[in-house]
Amino acid sequence: MSKKIPHFHFSLFFLFLFFFLFLSSPYIYALPAHDVEIIANQEYFQKVHQALEKANESIKIMMFQAGYYEKYPDSPSNILIEDLIKAKKRGVKVEVILEIGIWNEVNKKNIEVGNLLSKNGIEVRYDSPSITTHAKLIIVDKKISILGSNNWTYYSLAKNNEVSVIITSEEVARVLEEYFEKIVNK
């Protein structure tokens, strides 16, 4: 013989579940955005380059892999890395998190880029070797967020099929900055 759950208790349970899942977490519901733009393949470089050049206050970067190629000074990744250095020189606060882990080639490139950035006064951190930071995230002036598949390497910026999104939203940038700080403080 089965026992029926009173309608009141059933409704109360779902009301609690709704409150817990949808109202208690900022990541569940949609955040307002003024503009969302899809950028594919080589469009990424130009859009990111423009955003970094226009930065006035802050730039936060979380990147799985970045490469600086001394033999190819005009490579897209070199230009973006130089954009960070120029931004720092004009007074923009620049913070970078790079992956360090089990990937020897990634580690080598990221340490080289991290050293270059650090020598130019940019705050560089490496994630914990026990966890992979595969994110590719840029936050500019607490309002522009760029997320997607692009690493800052030659092939990713010049040859691969990649897709990213630029979101203009202070609310989205705030949530992503909280995520960034969470990784910094681990």
Image: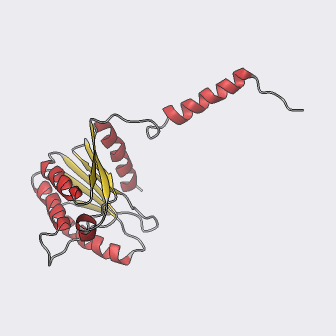
Q: Is residue 122 visible?
A: yes
Residue 57: where, in percent of width, then height?
17, 45
Figure quadrant of the N terminus: top right
Q: Quadrant of residue 144?
A: top left
Is residue 77 depicted above or below 31 in this figure?
A: below
Q: Which residue is drawn at 48% across and 37% down?
A: 25
Figure quadrant of the C terminus: bottom left
Residue 177: where, in percent of width, then height?
33, 46
Residue at the top extreme? 8
Q: In this view, does 14 lie to the left or right of 31?
A: right
Q: Is residue 4 left or right of residue 148?
A: right
Residue 117: where, in percent of width, then height?
20, 65
Is residue 168 depicted above or below 61 in this figure?
A: above
Q: In this view, does 42 lie to the left or right of 178?
A: left
Residue at the right extreme? 1
Q: Residue at x 18, y 61 (%)?
A: 80
Q: Can residue 119 be seen in this view?
A: no
Q: Residue at x 22, y 66 (%)?
A: 158
Nearer to us in this view, 69 or 57: 69
Q: Residue at x 22, y 51 (%)?
A: 59
